[in-house]
């Protein structure tokens, strides 16, 4: 694929390495993913990977219902910002809004919808999907309007760049990318800023959640993170996916999706330090079962043609099954200090 108006990631990365020497892994990942998402719709069977909201409308609907309940528990403030970071095709937020419009017209009336998205291609898809419903698009959290914030991040943080650092004797080193003739190869460089800990560190995701949690803690609202991840201590979970298959992350930057598992322990800690109350992480399967995914799926199937019903059932099983997405994927909620336990997180 590729777009003539977009700089070619391979050429940009090669030129920077030629000029400055080996490139830190996080810079490589940031440049590769920016080019990747800027130039395509990667989702679905014909693309590179399939995400939860693309498999069943129940996923976005349950998240919409979750937001309504949390909003009511906080005394139904108005107006509020309803935002999603990295909305992809806009499917999750469209499904959530359809349910909100029906179930909670008061919440619908209080919400202005804001999307955080850097890709021009995906912004266009989101606009086509959501029409005039989107108040504004943003490059980052910083420009969201002030006030109560209800924010969703589903498979967003895994796309943010990671560093991989380790000790070598007395020194800290980190993973970097070098050029060998016309190929990218792994190398190690002295760690530039003293890292907080060894292993794989997602500084961008930690800074992001600290900023979001700070807002929620001070202006009310909620952040719901759904993503694949671990409980801390990982060294290398970087993966590249193209056409639904794992590929070499260095083979074609900008042509494959790069992601790394989210460190939920680090995210929870960053949110707590920012002053927020944190619930979870809990397995996605437990969360979606508690919110009623099986029951919602059964209702949708009653009115669906048999082939659609089979798809909806398969999607629900995939989201809940511990051997599929039920255990590796997790849910984390960030709320104002003193907030009661949100739906799905009760022990
Ligand atoms: N949540 C969607 C899409 C996940 S893919 C789904 O589950 O289907 C990651 C999304 O994050 C894409 O929309 C991508 O363009 C966006 N994205 C990646 N890096 C970003 C960044 N640094 N800032 C804002 N959006 C980003």
Image: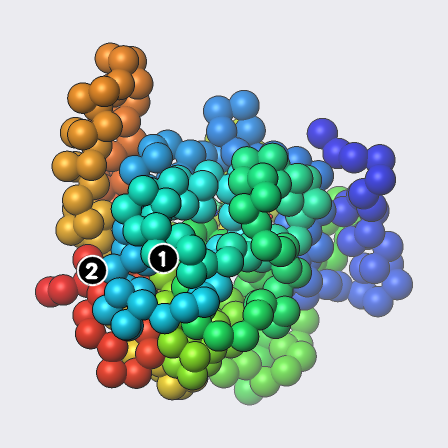
Q: In this orientation, which residue lies closer to the viewer: 345 or 114?
A: 114
Please give the residue where the numbered disc 2 appears in the rendered image.
Answer: 343
Can residue 89 be seen? yes
**Where residue 260 appears, x then y in whole percent?**
48, 55
The residue depicted at 40 percent of the width and 53 percent of the height is 108
Horizontally, residue 201 falls left or right of residue 298, namely right
User: What is the quadrant of the C terminus in the image?
Assistant: bottom left
**Where residue 155 appears, x then y in whole percent?**
45, 51
**Where residue 293 appears, x then y in whole percent?**
21, 41
The image shows a total of numbered marks equal to: 2
Crowding around mark 2 (Cα neighbors within 10 Å: few <14, some 14 to 19, many 20+) is some
Whether the residue under disc 2 has CB within 8 Å of ligand 1: no
Disc number placed over residue 107 in the picture, else none = 1
The structure's colour scheme is rainbow
How far separated are the C-alphas under marks 2 and 1? 17 Å
Crowding around mark 1 (Cα neighbors within 10 Å: few <14, some 14 to 19, many 20+) is many
């Amino acid at each position: 694929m590729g777009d003539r108006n977009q700089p070619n990631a391979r050429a940009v990365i090669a030129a920077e390495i030629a000029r400055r020497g080996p490139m830190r892994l996080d810079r490589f990942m940031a440049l590769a993913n920016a080019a990747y998402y800027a130039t395509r719709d990667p989702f679905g069977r014909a693309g590179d990977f399939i995400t939860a909201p693309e498999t069943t409308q129940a996923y976005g609907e349950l998240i919409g219902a979750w937001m309504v309940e949390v909003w009511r528990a906080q005394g139904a403030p108005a107006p509020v910002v309803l935002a999603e970071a990295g909305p992809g095709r806009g499917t999750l937020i469209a499904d959530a809004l359809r349910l909100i419009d029906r179930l909670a017209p008061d919440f619908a009336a209080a919400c202005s919808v804001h999307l955080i998205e850097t890709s021009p291609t995906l912004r266009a898809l989101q606009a086509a999907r959501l029409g005039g419903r989107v108040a504004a698009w943003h490059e980052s959290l910083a420009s969201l309007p002030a006030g109560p914030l209800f924010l969703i991040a589903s498979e967003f943080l895994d796309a943010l760049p990671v560093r991989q650092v380790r000790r070598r004797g007395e020194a800290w080193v980190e993973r970097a990318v070098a050029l060998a003739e016309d190929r990218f190869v792994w190398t190690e460089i002295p760690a530039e800023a003293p890292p907080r800990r060894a292993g794989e560190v997602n500084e961008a995701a930690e800074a992001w959640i600290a900023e979001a949690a700070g807002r929620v803690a001070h202006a009310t609202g909620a952040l719901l993170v759904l993503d694949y991840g671990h409980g801390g201590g990982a060294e290398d979970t970087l993966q590249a996916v193209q056409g639904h298959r794992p590929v070499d992350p260095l083979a074609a930057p900008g042509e494959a999706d790069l992601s790394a598992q989210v460190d939920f322990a680090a995210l929870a800690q960053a949110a707590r330090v920012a002053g927020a109350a944190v619930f979870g992480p809990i397995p996605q399967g437990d969360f979606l079962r508690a919110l009623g995914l099986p029951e919602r799926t059964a209702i949708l199937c009653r009115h669906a043609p048999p082939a659609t019903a089979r798809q909806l059932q398969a999607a629900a099983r995939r989201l809940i099954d511990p051997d599929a997405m039920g255990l590796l994927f997790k849910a984390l909620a960030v709320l104002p200090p003193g907030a009661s336990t949100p739906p799905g997180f009760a022990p």
